Image: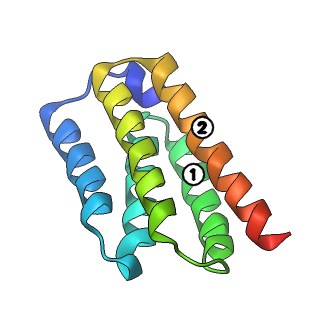
């Protein structure tokens, strides 16, 4: 949401698209690092150092949990579809759509973790 409120420079927009594409193109073993880089970039684009730090902290913990479950291609496809909606909303400057898309993405990740780790 915060990143979508900012007027992004051309380089920031290009970086966001590059990181999104890196997720789309990542091999299975490289997906989680690419995913983390995209999430961190979105947090950094918010312009809030404290938000970027909190997201970095959360990613470390979430990645530890994600590493305990199988990485399934269908989940990656779904995650990348959600990433595309998030990035599109940020680039369009639509905070509500960005917030809604990110909430859906995070809720989906939480549900996935609960299903596998319960």
Please state which of residues 2 and 102 is positioned toward the viewer in this rendering.
102
Kindly state the secondary structure of the residue where label 2 is placed: helix
Q: In this view, does 19 lie above or below 63?
A: above
Q: In which quadrant of the rendered view does residue 87 lie? A: top left
Residue 18 is situated, as x and y percent measured from the top left of the image, at: 20, 52
Q: Which of marks 2 and 1 is nearer the N terminus?
A: 1
Residue 69 is situated, as x and y percent measured from the top left of the image, at: 65, 77
Q: Residue 114 carries which label?
A: none
Q: In this view, does 2 lie above or below 78?
A: above
Q: Residue at x 49, y 36 (%)?
A: 48
Q: Which mark is residue 104?
A: 2
Q: In this view, does 34 lie to the left or right of 109?
A: left
Q: Residues within 10 Å of mark 1 (few under 14, many from 20)?
A: some
Tally the numbered discs: 2
Q: Which mark is residue 55?
A: 1
Residue 58 is situated, as x and y percent measured from the top left of the image, at: 64, 58
Kindly state the secondary structure of the residue where label 1 is placed: helix
Q: How far apart are marks 2 and 1 (CA)?
A: 16 Å
Quarter of the picture containing the C terminus is: bottom right
Q: Is residue 48 above or below residue 39?
A: above
Q: Residue at x 38, y 53 (%)?
A: 38
Residue 47 is situated, as x and y percent measured from the top left of the image, at: 42, 34
């Amino acid at each position: 949401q915060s990143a979508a409120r900012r007027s992004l420079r051309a380089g920031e927009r290009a970086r966001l698209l590059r990181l999104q594409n890196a997720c789309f193109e990542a091999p299975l073993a490289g997906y989680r690092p690419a995913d983390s880089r995209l999430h961190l970039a979105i947090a950094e684009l918010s312009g809030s150092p404290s938000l970027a730090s909190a997201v970095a902290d959360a990613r470390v913990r979430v990645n530890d949990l994600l590493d305990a479950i199988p990485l399934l291609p269908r989940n990656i496809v779904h995650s990348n579809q959600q990433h595309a909606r998030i990035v599109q909303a940020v680039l369009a400057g639509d905070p509500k759509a960005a917030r809604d898309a990110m909430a859906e993405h995070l809720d989906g990740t939480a549900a996935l973790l609960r299903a596998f780790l319960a």
